[in-house]
Image: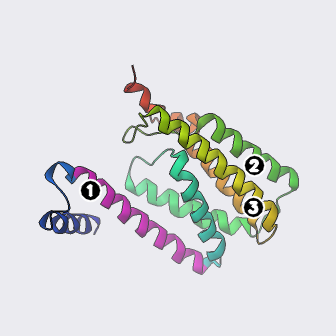
Amino acid sequence: MKEVFVNRSLTYLIKNNACKKEQINTFRYVLESLYSLVSKTSAVLIISIFLNTFKITFISLLLFSILRGFTFGIHASKNLYCWITTLGIYSICPFLIQRIYFSKELIISCYLIGFLSILFFSPSDTPKRPLINKRKRKVNKIISLGIGIVYILISFIINGDYFYQVICFVLLLTSICINPLTYKLFKIPYNNYKNYCS
């Protein structure tokens, strides 16, 4: 299904002079990413309706996606693994958020771990998408720190509807995705930009 969508879209773009031959690989990557994003998000949200966790799941997905846009982080090596991980995390965690009590100490610990992880490890690139530009790495770190602070401040203002727990979940998930130990565990190279810098 994905190949059909990507190939038909590429054919349409090429036919209408929106994509040149030298841009095909870039457009293919974008279209594959778009397809994966839409299909996985749809699946997660449909499952959340049945689990009665739609609101928590939707907010978690939204906040994590915004933060991940600047922290980057690890990607599954195969599409199947990505599906399993995504469905597992976004089905189980929002379900647990509704049922587990988060003490103030736990919330503060999650916030601290998340903030320090962003400070020390963000942005974390991948072999397929190395962050070569030093200025962009610095800008991404500053923006991701800012987003983390905003999330924490908003959680104190909203102060309800499991928002503390959602922020804890988002920050911890981000921490796992950008941590060098996670990369090491899955045998994926870390700080890939260094291969391009002299």
Between marks 1 and 2 in the image, the one whose residue lies nearer the viewer:
1
Task: Work out whether residue 168 can be spotted.
Answer: no
Where residue 83 sits, quadrant-wise, is bottom left
Expressed as whole percent of the image width and height from the top left, the position of residue 130 reads: 40, 37
Residue named by callout 1 = 27
Residues rendered magenta in the picture:
25-50
Residue at 64 percent of width and 41 percent of height: 118
Residue at 71 percent of width and 65 percent of height: 96
Residue named by callout 3 = 154
Residue located farthest toward the right when viewing the structure as drawn: 104
Between marks 2 and 3 in the image, the one whose residue lies nearer the viewer:
3
Amino acid type shown at disc 2: Cys
Amino acid type shown at disc 1: Phe
Disc 2/disc 3 C-alpha distance (Å): 15 Å
Q: Secondary structure at mark 1?
A: helix
* Nearer-N-terminus badge (1/3): 1
Residue named by callout 2 = 110
Quadrant showing the C terminus? top left
How many neighbours does mark 2 have within 10 angstroms: few (below 14), some (14-19), or many (20 or more)?
A: many
Where residue 127 sits, quadrant-wise, is top left
Expressed as whole percent of the image width and height from the top left, the position of residue 1 reads: 28, 69
Horizontally, residue 163 falls left or right of residue 49, namely right
Residue 17 lies in the magenta-colored region:
no
Which of 190 and 145 lies nearest the eye of the viewer? 145
